[in-house]
Image (spheres, rainbow, N blue to C red):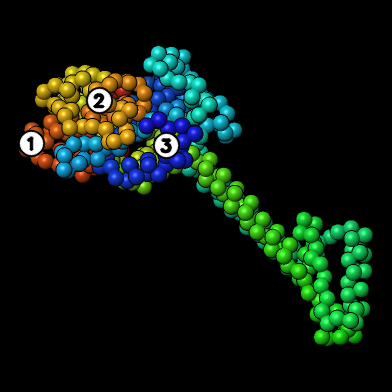
Amino acid sequence: MQVTRNNFEATLPIIKEAIENADFLSIDGEFTGIETKNPLNPKDTSEERYKAISKDFDFILIQYGLCAFKFNKQTGCYEYKAFNFYIFSHQESRPTFSAQKSSLEFLASNGFDFGKLYQEGIPYLDNDRYNKLKTNLQKKHLEQEKDSKMNLDNSILEVNEEFVEDFRSKLKDILKSEDQKSSILEPLNPSENLKLSTCTAPSNVDKDKKIEKNTENTNNYLQELKTRQNQELKELENSRGFSKVIEMIANSGKVVVGHNMLLDILHTVHQFVAPLPQSYTEFKTLAKTSLNCFFDTKYITSTKNIKTIVKNTSLPGLIRRMRKDPFTLENIKASPGFEEYSLNKSTLHEAGYDAVITGAVLIGIHRYLCKRCGRKEIISSKSRVLSIYLNNVFVMFSENNSMYFQ
């Protein structure tokens, strides 16, 4: 399913339901660049590699693929719902970004629609900035309410002399009136920020005489203020955009699958959660808070017991290999209404499709491992045959070749 700014809000309930009902999720990202500006040493520790990659992190993620897989016990099939999101923010908080010529050429050669990206890309606001803006807005609203109540109920604000004299004249006329027990004092216009709560008559005035205040305009003013405040909060919430989807993933607790997914994790944190921290330990905490736990099919197929069978560990190579013995891609199909991405129709390097085949590769590997050890289980973070691969992410050009998110 294609998701842009035009149908994002309407599609959110469908996305949420798919995530909550899934056994596992798979993701994929497309970026404006992938090469780091800093030199990489094959002997780097995980912390050194993180610092090298995260420094000057100026490329952005512009397409996000998400696929929710659910095992149907009645049919014995894995059914999936895939979403392809165009991501682009016009907010002033990030007015510039970097792009790599070869990356843009690669995307264009694979049919990437840059016009749709710019015109219909889903905005986003990372959770860190959103929380700060929300706190400041709530403080502003409290001050507004405090000032309004004070002005309406407890004080007379400074106004010009002509207005004061006019008001005094009207008040004297009412106090001199002898033909009625009760007189009406018209309310002051709230827009002038002049509010009176009580007026004390001189001691020689009839005690039965009451000066009443019409509060209709006052109540309208307070209601209008509350309406404006609610609208501001709604606009701020809407500005979160795609960050809401990442929050859904985090709240679901579901395991997330990627292929060579370190960049996917880095960009997910940086664009939708919080700017990448200097601390490697803090980054790992943010990553696990955002994406719970993960399996990286690049890492799994690079281990000795799998690599000898698959040979080619690229995503296109793996999906081809999964169609042959001892693997199988049988009984994996799109859910009704989500047939756009099929395992029988390749649209490689579109994030939604790549998320589908990433999940399919894990299913093929999982079936092979289960068959080899005689187990029957559904893919989840508690899978026994996959437990040794949990939270290990592949690292390119590294002797260690992995980063562990313990």
Residue shown at 29%/20% (left/top)? 346
Q: Is residue 23 visible?
A: yes
Q: Quadrant of the N terminus?
A: top left
- Which of discs 3 and 2 lies nearer the camera? The answer is 2
**Badge 2 is on which residue?**
343
* Residue 361 relative to residue 123: left or right: left
Residue type (three-letter) at the residue carrying disc 1:
Cys
* Nearer-the-camera pick, 355 or 309: 355
Residue shown at 41%/21% (left/top)? 34
Dot 1 falls on a residue whose secondary structure is: helix
Residue shown at 21%/26% (left/top)? 301
**Badge 3 is on which residue?**
269
Residue 183, by quadrant, is bottom right
Label 3–label 1 contact, CB within 8 A:
no
* Residue 311 relative to residue 171: left or right: left
Q: How far across and how far down the image is residue 248, in percent? A: 38, 44
Q: CA distance from mark 2 to mark 1?
A: 27 Å
N-terminal of the pair, mark 2 or mark 1, is 2
**Badge 1 is on which residue?**
373
Q: Is residue 261 visible?
A: no
Looking at the image, residue 76 lies above or below residue 326: below
Disc 1 residue crowd, few under 14, some 14–19, many 20+, Cα 10 Å? few
Give the total of numbered labels: 3
